[in-house]
Amino acid sequence: MSVYRTERKLLYLLIVVMTGAEVLDNISQECKQFLYMGTMPRGLEEQPLKKICQYYSGKPRFFTLYDTFSHTPVYSAYTFKRSDGSKKVDVPWMYEPQLSLVSGSREMEQFPSVNIHKSFEDSQAVLDDYSDTVIFERGQLNPDEHQADPDDKAATYTLTNVVPRVREFNIGPWKIHEHTIRKRLNNYCRGTAYVVTGVTTSGQSIRRHNINRLGIPTYLWSAYCCVDFDHNAPYSERSKFPAFAAHGLNDRENNRVQEMTVQQLEDFLKRVTYVSSSFQIFYDNCVPRNTVNSPLHSA
């Protein structure tokens, strides 16, 4: 395992040198707004990973931690916006110039012609990677139905926010889960809801021209944090605040999405993926300091 991880780190460094992409040590100030207390999930061991502040139409829209080796996001972090769940269907898929060029625009851009994208496909996914995948669909980690503003919705259509999701899982259990969370946060979250949605992988890949192109997620996971919520909500919903989580197997069968506490999800991820024993999704477990001793938290 140590040899594999050493080789992988060397490949990361080679990709960074070849593409000119800067691996930032700290998240940009303008993207901290998408993370609870401005803090990234801690304890991720696979380094280096690319921190992307996802810009669209002149504004930051959400944050993604991206793996330039598997050409897929590790997670996307965003703030939920109350919406009716409608999808924006007239948006072309986009890519991230900032992953490929030192002088690349920080704005996501529509994919250019087929011949030109060869210049940046070493560092990220391209449309051809998904063109012959019968089993998999492009699955957003920050789904457009969790956004309200048309530009916020449009920004979710970048391949740096997408993973290969098994069709039956994508249109079934995971889509139902996205609907459930949208309705719950619409109805009972009174303040800002911070959401982090990510994946685990086990080395399986989608190949193109006999080259590994896309890491296939084994599990999808998601967690939200909303400290300002309706304390008069039914207990079945109130008990899922201020934070709750879920995971599901990215497969055709046995793919039921299971809801659980954030701590249960963290324990699960410590068993199935490369995170440290200190792994924590939300700062201070999304427990507001003035409610630590409240009946809800001491029960």
Image (spheres, rainbow, N blue to C red):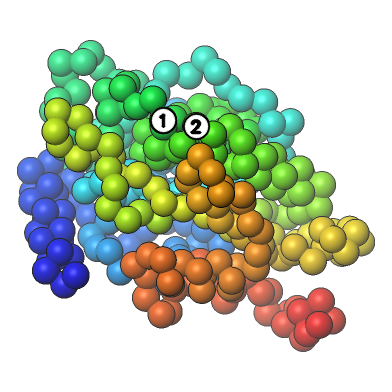
Per the rendering, the mark at residue 2 is none
- Read off the residue under disc 1: 135
Can residue 141 be seen by looking at this rendering?
no
- Cα separation between marks 1 and 2: 6 Å
Pinpoint residue 205: horizontal percent, then vertical percent: 27, 43
Can residue 26 be seen by looking at this rendering?
yes
Which three-letter amino acid code belongs to the residue tagged 1?
Ile
Q: Is residue 187 above or below residue 243?
A: above
Mark 1, secondary structure of its residue: loop
- In the picture, residue 194 is in which quadrant? bottom right
Pinpoint residue 135: horizontal percent, then vertical percent: 41, 30
Residue found 71% across the figure and 65% down from its top: 242
State left or right for residue 231 relative to residue 6.
right
- Read off the residue under disc 2: 167
State left or right for residue 201 relative to residue 229.
left
In depth, the one of 212 and 127 nearer the eye is 212
Which three-letter amino acid code belongs to the residue tagged 2?
Arg
Q: Is residue 225 above or below residue 66?
A: below
Q: Is residue 53 above or below residue 95?
A: below
On-image quarter of the N terminus: bottom left
On-image quarter of the C terminus: bottom right
State left or right for residue 224 relative to residue 93.
right
Q: Earlier in the sequence, mark 1 or mark 2?
A: 1
- In the picture, residue 291 is in which quadrant? bottom right
